[in-house]
Image (spheres, rainbow, N blue to C red):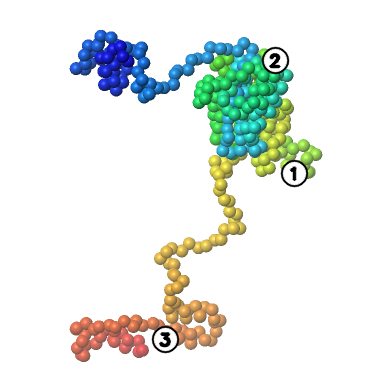
């Protein structure tokens, strides 16, 4: 700032105050001692402000809009999760169509599987939609920027768009969709006290449901309707994680075996007309149409998923409660009177009961402490009370 030294100096004196605020202070005479600065170099660059006050520029709202399905596909990878799924997956690969906002999810154990899953997704979706993927937008993750990935996209005529480093906003569609899926999945897991290992099934079910719910970016039309041209049917929807009873076919059970198994509802299978359920004991998945639901109940209680040790009645030893004042140390000496009583209880009762009773009397313990007579009893004419007491016992 060289053209206006006065404004530049006061700009620096006031802690690199913005020129707009400096103008207000001068025009309204808000402080004393500030000269009347005629001009302000608001458009000039201050090097100190760039070093001390630099911030990220605002993001422009995307004005580009796809005109047909698969013109632009957003993709991102979530993970690794702290708890692997029951299938061992720790990552979720997401694909979102920009035009319809239709979402596909795949679960992988390692990042190296992303490329093969993209090929699988491309072949599946292009065959169903009967269109080609024109552009793929991802971040700069190594799983998306390998030479193999770029070479395949060039051969297939797929344009690549990458977001800048540390700028997830440029891939906002995929980022926001992941957040939507995670929030939905977490709500189901916590509401039904389900184990975290069911996160993959929760994510897949969330994508299935969200694809059939109207969205704001699509003018309150569901991605399913925009993709397939018809309204979705939600009549078969059930609460994720609820208790259900799956019918067991006759050839898989005995005459006296139960005709149904108590399971947990964990989603839908788009390849079969049935509900996907899990047996909690065996962790086996089964797809069946013969299912009865109890959507208000949960298989797990609030404490069943925690590590609580269950002790059977056979393992519990009933011990009488004894207060501290009644407890006797094992090293404490046993008095003669108590010893004799114990011997008497252990010996057989007979004609020697009277002799034992006399022995107990003889075993009465006397104190060995030296007793000093009070002054009033030191006269020989007076009888010491203890002597008088002993004389009555004739001992």
Nearer to us: label 3 or label 2: 2
Q: Is 284 in front, or is 18?
A: 18
Numbered disc 3: secondary structure: helix
- Distance between mark 2 and mark 1 Cα atoms: 51 Å
Q: Quadrant of residue 19?
A: top left
**Residue at point 54% right, 29% down?**
183
Position of 228 relative to 355 (above/below): above
Q: Residues within 10 Å of mark 2 (few under 14, many from 20)?
A: few
Q: Residue 81, relative to residue 371: is it above or below?
A: above
The tag earlier along the polypeptide, 3 or 2, is 2
Q: Which residue is mark 2?
A: 131
The residue closer to the viewer here, 1 or 388, is 1
In the image, residue 344 sits, relative to residue 110, either above or below, namely below
Residue 13 falls in image quadrant:
top left
| Marks 3,2: beta carbons within 8 A | no
Q: CA distance from mark 3 to mark 1?
A: 75 Å
Q: Residue at x 69, y 39 (%)?
A: 284
Is label 2 or label 1 in front?
2
Q: Position of residue 26 (x, y in %)?
A: 24, 13
Q: What residue did someone put label 1 on?
A: 257
Disc ID at residue 362: 3
Give 196 or 121, whichever is nearer the viewer: 121
Residue 126 visible in rendering:
yes
Instruction: Tell me whether circle 2 and circle 1 mark residues in contact (CB < 8 Å).
Output: no
Q: Earlier in the sequence, mark 3 or mark 1?
A: 1
Q: Residues within 10 Å of mark 3 (few under 14, many from 20)?
A: few
């Amino acid at each position: 700032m060289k053209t206006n030294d006065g404004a530049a100096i006061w700009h620096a004196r006031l802690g690199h105050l913005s020129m707009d605020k400096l103008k207000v202070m001068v025009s309204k005479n808000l402080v004393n001692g500030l000269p009347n600065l005629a001009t302000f170099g608001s458009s000039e660059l201050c090097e100190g402000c760039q070093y001390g006050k630099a911030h990220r520029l605002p993001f422009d709202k995307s004005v580009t809009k796809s005109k047909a399905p698969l013109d632009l596909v957003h993709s991102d990878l979530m993970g690794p999760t702290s708890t692997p799924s029951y299938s061992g997956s720790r990552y979720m690969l997401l694909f979102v169509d920009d035009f319809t906002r239709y979402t596909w999810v795949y679960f992988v154990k390692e990042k190296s599987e992303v490329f093969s899953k993209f090929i699988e997704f491309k072949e599946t979706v292009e065959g169903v939609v009967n269109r080609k993927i024109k552009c793929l937008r991802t971040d700069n993750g190594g799983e998306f920027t390998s030479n193999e990935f770029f070479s395949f996209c060039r051969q297939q005529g797929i344009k690549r768009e990458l977001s800048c480093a540390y700028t997830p906003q440029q891939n906002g569609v995929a980022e926001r969709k992941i957040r939507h899926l995670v929030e939905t999945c977490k709500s189901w897991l916590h509401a039904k006290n389900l184990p975290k290992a069911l996160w993959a099934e929760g994510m897949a079910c969330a994508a299935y449901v969200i694809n059939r719910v109207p969205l704001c970016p699509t003018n309150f039309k569901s991605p399913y309707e925009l993709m397939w041209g018809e309204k979705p049917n939600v009549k078969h929807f059930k609460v994720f994680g609820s208790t259900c009873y799956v019918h067991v076919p006759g050839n898989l059970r005995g005459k006296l075996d139960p005709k149904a198994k108590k399971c947990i509802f964990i989603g839908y299978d788009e390849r079969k007309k049935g509900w996907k359920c899990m047996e909690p004991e065996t962790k086996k998945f089964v797809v069946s149409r013969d299912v009865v639901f109890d959507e208000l109940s949960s298989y797990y209680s609030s404490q069943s998923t925690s590590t609580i040790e269950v002790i059977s009645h056979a393992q519990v030893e009933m011990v009488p409660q004894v207060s501290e004042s009644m407890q006797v140390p094992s090293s404490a000496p046993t008095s003669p009177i108590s010893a004799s009583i114990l011997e008497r209880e252990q010996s057989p009762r007979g004609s020697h009961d009277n002799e034992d009773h006399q022995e107990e009397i003889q075993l009465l313990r006397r104190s060995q402490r030296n007793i000093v007579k009070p002054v009033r009893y030191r006269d020989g004419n007076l009888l010491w009370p203890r002597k008088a007491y002993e004389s009555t016992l004739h001992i």
